[in-house]
Image (cartoon, rainbow, N blue to C red):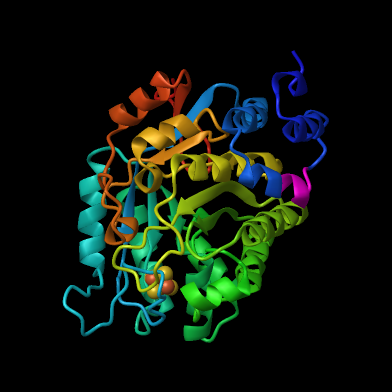
Amino acid sequence: MKLADAVQDRTLRTIAEKVEQDIPVDQTDTRYMLATTNILDLGTIAQFVRRRLHGSIAYYGVNMNMNYTNICELRCPLCAFSCDESDEGSYVLSLDEVRERVKNAESSGIDEIHIVGGLHPRLKLDYFEGMLRCIREIKPDIFIVAFTAVEYDYFARLNDLPVETVLRRLIDAGVNAIPGGGAEIFSPHVRETIAPKKISGARWLEIMRIAHGMGLKTNATMLYNHHECVDDVVDHLFRIRALQDETHGFKTFVPLAFHETNTRIQAHRREATGYDDIRIYATSRVVLHNIPHIKALWMYVGEKMAQVLLNFGVDDMSGTYNNEKVVHAAGARTADYGSEGALRRVIMDAGMVPRRTTAGYGTKAGVTA
Ligand code: SF4
């Protein structure tokens, strides 16, 4: 059966016809998808795109999270994780502590480490080079996803170096890919409220363009359900899609539901509903036809919703994330660690085939289902 024949809603059927013919959807289509209550038709379209790319494979990772410091100059209102140096609970990991954490996680067989932290004015580039080299010494084949575009911009300014030099030095020290954090929502008026001192959306995209030009693959995120309106979401998705058309450097798009506990902004609406989550993920899958993967971080949306999303365009359940701190500081009620067995069970129970991978999406011999 043709895709469009499986879709009842008239407007969604027109969108399905475009998708079937590989015609990119436009902004009007996107607004419609973001507002529809017909999630089954929307899911049918999103799933068509997902299956065309990945069949019934669903990816997951066995990884650890490392937040090297919670001290941050910016103190964005949206952030529940950061603090000032004088605050109780502030910390900076020493290289010995980094070593110990990686050794502990390594003994449980991780493939990947995800490193992000606050913008600390006394942590110079040699601290990060030392950290990366020490991780590589412990586990030479580990996949290192490290530092957001916001951190690269800060390192460049703090060390008085071009961002290209910072990227080159950190690639040489071990970085394999860049996480998608810091994108938030590009709309300047919303950014002014939720993260007024953070780099602009334009600068975030510029750093990604430079990184892609140097051969790095990166993720892109979008923070939703705070102060943004539908047009802000549409703008965000289309700016990501346009850069991807140019560079082909984004591997994965990761929508993130905002958690407001302990932040200094109040969301304009209540916690995202199930339909909100489904509309955002499924619409992202359809709009971002040129980005291979859509990832649902189970600790943001909950394990049950992440499982449902596997049938609404998502192909990556994210990883075990031993020791996640950022979203849990903002009140996420999920566990801060998921076992590999639990992730595989959730994927198989959704009728999918689990595949263990890293942010580079190379498969790991011997563990692919
Ligand atoms: S969101 Fe990032 S840049 Fe902003 S305060 Fe938190 S750690 Fe710092």
Quadrant of the rendered structure where residue 258 is? bottom left
**How many marks overall?**
0
Q: Position of residue 143 (x, y in %)?
A: 44, 47
* Along the viewing direction, whichever of 114 and 343 lies nearer the viewer: 343
Q: Is residue 3 left or right of residue 194?
A: right
Q: Quadrant of ligand 1?
A: bottom left
* Along the viewing direction, whichever of 229 and 91 lies nearer the viewer: 229
- Which image quarter holds the C terminus? top left
Q: Is residue 48 left or right of residue 318?
A: right
Q: Residue at x 59, y 28 (%)?
A: 40
Residue 254 visible: yes
Residue 255 among magenta residues: no
* Residues rendered magenta in the picture: 25-30
Q: Position of residue 316 (x, y in %)?
A: 49, 36
Give above or below for 150 relative to 65.
Answer: below
Q: Position of residue 38 (x, y in %)?
A: 61, 33
- Which image quarter holds the N terminus? top right
Q: Residue at x 37, y 51 (%)?
A: 113
Give above or below for 320 relative to 190.
Answer: above
Residue 140 visible: no
